[in-house]
Image (tube, rainbow, N blue to C red):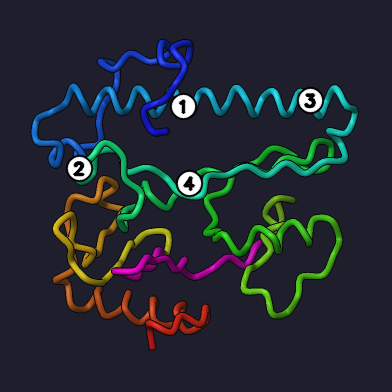
Amino acid sequence: LPEECKKEFLDMFDPASFVPNPAVQMRYKGDEKRLRKSLQVYYGQVAAIDHEVGRVLQGLEDLGVADNTIVLYLSDHGDVLGWDGRRRGKSVPRSPAFRVPMFVRWKGTLAPRETDALIAAPDIPATILDLVGLNVPGTWQGRSFAATCRGEAYREHEAIYMGLHPWRGVWDGRYLYSEGEASSLYDPNILFDLGLDPYELENRFDDARLRKQMQEKMRAVAIETGDPRVT
């Protein structure tokens, strides 16, 4: 549950030490103490997961199969802590909700490296098949990023498509665009330049030229993915 965390991990983080996201501070209506508590719980939970992943990796070593096991770890979504005044959030078109860390480990085969390539969830099965030498079905939407795992050139996506019931969006590594039905909690009609505005404070949705550019990009990816809601 969101508020559950063992004390040993909570105690690793002092709520007073956090520097909250400015966009979140603006929406939290001055209740910074509650926001800092949420951050402490969140980071405590992350530390707990790190601990358990370490136990799994050590288990592979103890069993003698670490060199023959591909370990892939990621979250299904991020957490926009306090973005809309609630303690936790994940369903809004904001970068902390969809930009999640991931690691792929194959001891003795893949050298440590980092990448900021655009990777989507359907790419993961394709990558696993590719890494183990199996063919990726031609009907599969995902694109293998095994090449970038090996440090080779990778033909990444032009943009990543995303959405939930009331909205659809696209992320191209710099611009985040979404459109849809506004609710009492948030307006999904947004356009942010994260290169210049990493905290998503300036909505450029009224920039007609840039909005058209991103709409066309979103439509192209939507058609590629077969989304019936975007034609």
In the image, taking residue 7 as reference, residue 214 lies left or right, namely left
Q: Distance between the residues labelled 3 and 2?
A: 41 Å
Q: Which of marks 1 and 4 is nearer the N terminus?
A: 1
For label 2, the SS is: helix
Snapshot quadrant of residue 55: top right
Q: Is residue 67 left or right of residue 220?
A: right
Residue at point 36% right, 49% down?
A: 90
Q: Is residue 94 placed above or below 34 in the rendered structure?
A: below
Question: Quick one: quadrant of the N terminus?
Answer: top left
In this picture, which residue range is highlighted in magenta? 153-171
Q: Of helix, strand and loop, which one carries label 1?
A: helix
**Front-lying residue, 92 or 177:** 92
Residue that appears at 57% across and 26% down:
50
Residue 153, by quadrant, is bottom right
- Label 3 and label 1: CA atoms lie apart by 21 Å
Crowd class of label 2 (few under 14; some 14 to 19; many from 20; radius 10 Å):
some
Which amino acid, by three-letter code, is at mark 3?
Answer: Gly
Residue 177 within the magenta-colored segment of the rendering: no
Work out whether 137 lies above or below 53.
below
Dot 4, how many residues are within 10 Å of its Cα: few (below 14), some (14-19), or many (20+)?
A: few
Bin the neighbour count of mark 3 within 10 Å (Cα to Cα): few under 14, some 14-19, many 20 and up: few
Q: Which mark is residue 45?
A: 1
Query: What amino acid type is highlighted by mark number 2?
Result: Ala
Residue position for label 3: 59
- Which element carries disc 4, helix, strand or loop? loop
Q: Which of marks 2 and 1 is in front?
A: 1
Q: Name the residue under label 2.
A: 23
Mark 1 and mark 2 in contact (Cβ < 8 Å)?
no
